[in-house]
Amino acid sequence: MDIAPLRTSVSGAVLAAEDQGWDAARASHAGTGRPDVIVRVSNLDDVSEAVRFAAASRRPAVVRGGGHSAWSTLDDGVLIDLSALDSVEVVGDPEGGALVRIGGGARWGDVAQVLSEHGVGISSGDTASVGVGGLTLGGGIGWMVRAWGLAADQLVGAQLVTAEGEVVEVTEASHPELLWALRGGGGNFGVVTRFDFRAHDLAAVVWAELGVSGDARPILAALRDVLATAPRELTASYMDVPAMDPSAPAGATISACWAGDDEGALRAALAPLLDLDGVSEREIGVRAYPDILLDAPMPDPDQPLPGFIGGNTLVRKLDDDLIDRFASFRESTPASVIFFRSLGGAFGDVEQDATPFPARDATWFAMAGAFDIPGLVDDAERGRLEGAWAAIEERGQGVYGNFSTTTDPDFAHRMYPATTMARLAAVKATWDPRNLFARNHNVIPA
C-alpha cells in the first residue's frame, strides 16, 4: 500500500511500521493493534483525507477516540487517531441548558474538568480516559444516568465526516434520522469530529463509598429496594472483584453519586443500607465531579489481559432469583467479578424508539464474568461458566455494547431488537453503503 500520497495530503502525522514512534502510536487501553497505517489527524481536513484514502485503498477505517475499544486491536485498516481533536467549548445557555461542543478525540476526564469550571456537567462514563466519542455513540451509562439519562440522550447535534469524506452538520432539523442513529447506534455511520451536548447545572456531587462483607444476597436486595423509590438524583453501583487489579481494590463495595451537593439527602436515601449488618461507611462527602472519575492505567503490552467468560445484560426486574444467580456465579469462582449499576429515572423517561438504545424499561445494568486464566480454567470449567452466564443473560432484555470486548461481527444482533436493527440498517445504507466503517458492533447496510 502506497501511503506517500497520504503523507502529502495530511498535515498531521502519518505513521507506518518502519517509522519512529510506531509502537507507541498503535498501543491503546484495549491493547496493541496492527493497522496498516496510523493517521494522527490534526484538523477536520485530515479526517476527510484519511477516510478517502481508506475508501480508495479498500481498507477498513478504524476510528480511535479514547482507545478503549477492542476493535482497534485487530489487524489491518487505516487507524484514524482523533486524539488531537479534543476541544471543549461552552458556547451559551439556550433553552435552559448550556450548549457544549466537544471534539471527537476528547476524553471524559478532561471534559469534566472544563465543565466543572463552568458549573455544568454531562452524564459521562466512569473512567477519565474513556473517549467521549465511543461512549456516546454506544449510549453512555454513567454516574448521572438516573438524573439525566445516557450521554446519548443529551446529544443535540454533531459534525460528521461521511464515508465519502464529506463533512455534514447533523441536527434534528437537518438530518433527524442520522442523529437518531448516532444516539446509541455506534460508530457505523461516519467519523464524528464534534459532539454538541445539552449540559446541566452541576456545582458538585455527593460521593459515597460503602464497604460490604458477608452474603451479597440481602445487601443486593436492600440496594434494589432503596433504588426503587430513591430520588433520581441518586445513582448507585455494586461491585465485587477479586484481588487481581491494583486499580480496583479486592472485595465488594457500594458506590453512590448524588447529582448535587445535598449530603443530607444522600445520607437519608442510603440510610436503609447503612443500617444493615455487613455494610460500613467508608466515605460520604461533597466532591467535584471530575474527582470521582476513575483512572485506568495503560496495560502492559508484555502481559496481555486474560480472557473474560461472561457478559452483561439490562434487567427489567432485579428479583431475588436473579440476585442469587449473580451471587452464586461470584461465589463459585474466585477469579470472577459481578457489577450492578442502577437505571430508571431519566433513563426510563425516554421512549423506546427515540434512540436505538435497548430496554428503556430496564431498572438495572448488570455484569458477571470470570477471568479465563491459562492453567486455572480448563474446558469443563469454561463450559460451566458459559452455561451459568447464559442462564443469567436469558433473564435480561438487552446487551450494552460499550461493556463488551467481543469483536464478533454478529454481536450487534444481540444488542438491538429486530425493528431497531432494520432502522439502523436503512440509515447505514444511506450514509455508508459500502460498510467502510465496519470496525464496530457492525450494522450491515440494508
Image: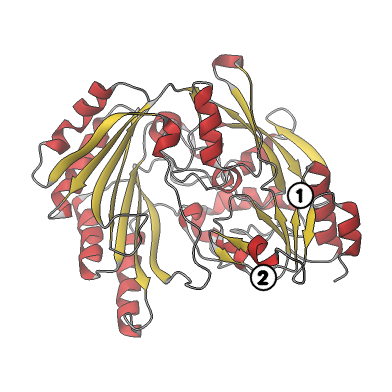
Frontmost residue, 111 versus 399: 111
> Which quarter of the figure has residue 322?
bottom left
Q: Residue 10: horizontal and vertical position, in percent?
A: 85, 52
Please count the marks in the image: 2
Frontmost residue, 408 versus 213: 213
Q: Is residue 393 left or right of residue 445?
A: left
Residue furthest to the front: 20
Up/down of 23 relative to 286, above or below: below
Which residue does the image show at 38% across and 81% down from the upper left?
A: 374
> Which quarter of the figure has residue 234?
top left
Disc 1 residue type (three-letter): Val
Frontmost residue, 13 versus 218: 13
Which residue does the image show at 44% across and 48% down from the upper left?
A: 295
Q: Residue 170: horizontal and vertical position, in percent?
A: 72, 35
Disc 2 residue type (three-letter): Arg
CA neighbours of label 1 inside 10 A, class few (<14), some (14 to 19), many (20+) = many
- SS for tag 2? loop
Please tell me the numbered disc located at residue 41. Answer: 1
Q: Are marks 1 and 2 in contact (CB under 8 Å)?
A: no
Residue on which disc 2 sits: 34
CA neighbours of label 2 inside 10 A, class few (<14), some (14 to 19), many (20+) = some
- SS for tag 1? loop
Classify the position of the C terminus by image quarter: bottom right
Tell me the distance, in whole angstroms, between the alpha carbons under discs 1 and 2: 18 Å
Q: Residue 22: horizontal and vertical position, in percent?
A: 70, 65
